Image (cartoon, rainbow, N blue to C red):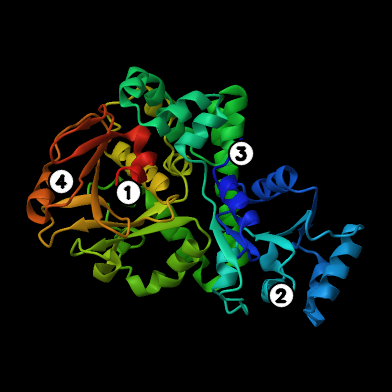
């Protein structure tokens, strides 16, 4: 399957300012596959080293971080010479040897000719746990589950993915049912690479669900294995509460839904742990929609989403027929899945800062506010073809934004004050500037 992140890796390779690269992302979003595929495509040779339970690597980095010595050790381990101009060096699960993270500084300063990429499923925790980290000496790339366009490409619909990027909405609308059907599939399958691969092979939703259950089980095992013992129960309770948090009409996170009488302070460490793992996206409220939005954020009010829409459906026990065929009882949670889907596409845009807005009375709520560095774009999310946008109109009248966007199942249309962007095209939002 093709990942758009591959293009970022080629830019990194060719950059005259290249530093060792760290790929961040949740477990099983495809970091290892991406690194190895890039090595095969872009280099004559790849030296892949997994640091998990690797005593030799722990010993190599334990005593001396001299780069000549380290390269010799890597060559002995790999059984061949490393040509800096032709070889990609991959450090996987690098957080298992914290001294290797520290060593990246010396590769940046003393041996910049070597091409080094690192990743690890719990790397975010290592970066925040006091590890001696080479600030300013590494590049970063965040990897997320497959976006909807990547899903289309992985399931044999490359031409439809290409069509979306042309913004030819007369043509796109002519094939809208294809996009809507694929979007419903994406809501169920999500973007975790293994789930997408299984679906692309045999279109078996039951097999997809089993993959998702295994991934969720692996996350639960990580809680027990890697988190401090005292916060493991709180991590579990907070994580398991997310579907019910999002099922509410007002999706603001409420600690009382985690446990009756719960207070924010009790769960701060658990929330940070989940965030560092890349398992949750925290979207803060702003009390005024002015640039920069970060200056107006309200840290006490936020919405919490999980890493993947397919995993959210699995956590909620959502059936295939309910999602694909529709169900009169399936109303509130459809909105939750739709917001999760939209947020999942937005976070892949590194240049966008994402918040949400409510006024003090709560009578006007905008699902997402997007700060692209030049303006604030309100984005209202509708699960169906509902074209009423009362909150968006109220917001428009008060703040006069240059651009307002509603995303729904309705066709593309541009009015004097608003653009309706179909849900299946929301990934193209950064082109509406």
Separation of disc 2 and disc 4 at Cα? 50 Å
Q: Residue at x 13, y 59 (%)?
A: 359
Specify which label sits upstream in the sequence, 1 or 3.
Answer: 3
Depth order, front residue of 15/22: 15
Find residue 392 and name its label.
Answer: 4
Q: Residue at x 37, y 40 (%)?
A: 428
Nearer the observer: mark 1 or 3; the answer is 3
Dots 3, 2 in contact, CB < 8 A: no
Dots 2, 4 in contact, CB < 8 A: no
Separation of disc 1 and disc 3 at Cα? 25 Å
**Element type at mark 3:** helix
Residue 49 relative to residue 369: left or right: right
Q: Position of residue 387 (x, y in %)?
A: 17, 32
- Whether residue 228 is visible here, answered yes or no, is no
Q: Position of residue 344 (x, y in %)?
A: 42, 46
Nearer the observer: mark 2 or 4; the answer is 2
Query: Where, by quadrant of the figure, is residue 173 drawn?
Result: top left
Q: How many marks?
A: 4
Specify which label sits upstream in the sequence, 2 or 4.
Answer: 2
Identify the residue under disc 2.
Answer: 103
Find residue 194 and name its label.
Answer: 3
């Amino acid at each position: 399957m093709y990942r758009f992140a591959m293009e970022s890796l080629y830019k990194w390779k060719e950059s005259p300012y290249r530093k060792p690269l760290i790929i961040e992302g949740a477990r099983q979003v495809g970091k290892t596959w991406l690194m190895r595929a890039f090595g095969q495509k872009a280099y004559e040779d790849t030296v892949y080293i997994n640091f998990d339970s690797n005593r030799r690597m722990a010993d190599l980095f334990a005593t001396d971080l001299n780069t000549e010595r380290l390269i010799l050790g890597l060559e002995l381990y790999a059984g061949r010479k490393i040509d800096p101009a032709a070889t990609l060096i991959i450090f996987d699960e690098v957080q298992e040897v914290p001294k290797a993270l520290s060593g990246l500084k010396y590769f940046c300063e003393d041996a910049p000719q070597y091409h080094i990429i690192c990743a690890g499923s719990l790397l975010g925790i290592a970066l925040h746990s006091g590890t001696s980290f080479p600030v300013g000496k590494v590049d970063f790339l965040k990897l997320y589950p497959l976006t909807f366009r990547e899903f289309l490409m992985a399931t044999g619909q490359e031409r439809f993915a290409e069509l979306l990027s042309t913004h030819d909405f007369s043509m796109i609308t002519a094939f809208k049912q294809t996009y809507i059907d694929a979007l419903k599939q994406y809501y169920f399958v999500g973007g975790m690479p293994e789930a997408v691969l299984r679906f692309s092979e045999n279109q078996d939703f039951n097999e997809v669900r089993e993959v998702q259950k295994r991934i969720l089980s692996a996350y639960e095992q990580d809680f027990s294995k890697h988190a401090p013992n005292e916060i493991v129960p709180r991590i579990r309770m907070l994580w398991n509460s997310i579907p019910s948090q999002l099922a509410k009409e007002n999706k603001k996170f409420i600690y009382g839904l985690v446990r009756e009488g719960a207070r924010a302070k009790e769960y701060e460490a658990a929330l940070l742990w989940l965030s560092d793992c890349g398992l949750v996206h925290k979207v803060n409220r702003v009390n005024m929609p002015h640039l920069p939005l970060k200056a107006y954020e309200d840290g006490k009010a936020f919405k919490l989403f999980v890493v993947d829409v397919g995993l959210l459906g699995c956590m909620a026990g959502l059936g295939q027929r309910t999602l694909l065929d529709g169900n009169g009882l399936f109303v509130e949670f459809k909105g939750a899945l739709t917001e999760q889907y939209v947020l999942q596409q937005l976070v892949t845009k590194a240049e966008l800062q994402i918040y949400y807005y409510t006024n003090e009375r709560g009578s006007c709520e905008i699902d997402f506010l997007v700060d692209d560095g030049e303006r604030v774009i309100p984005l209202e999310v509708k699960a169906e073809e509902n074209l009423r946008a009362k909150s968006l109109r109220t917001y428009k009248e008060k703040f006069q934004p240059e651009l307002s966007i509603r995303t729904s199942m309705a066709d593309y249309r541009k009015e004097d004050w608003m653009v309706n962007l179909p849900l299946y095209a929301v990934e193209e939002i950064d082109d509406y500037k």
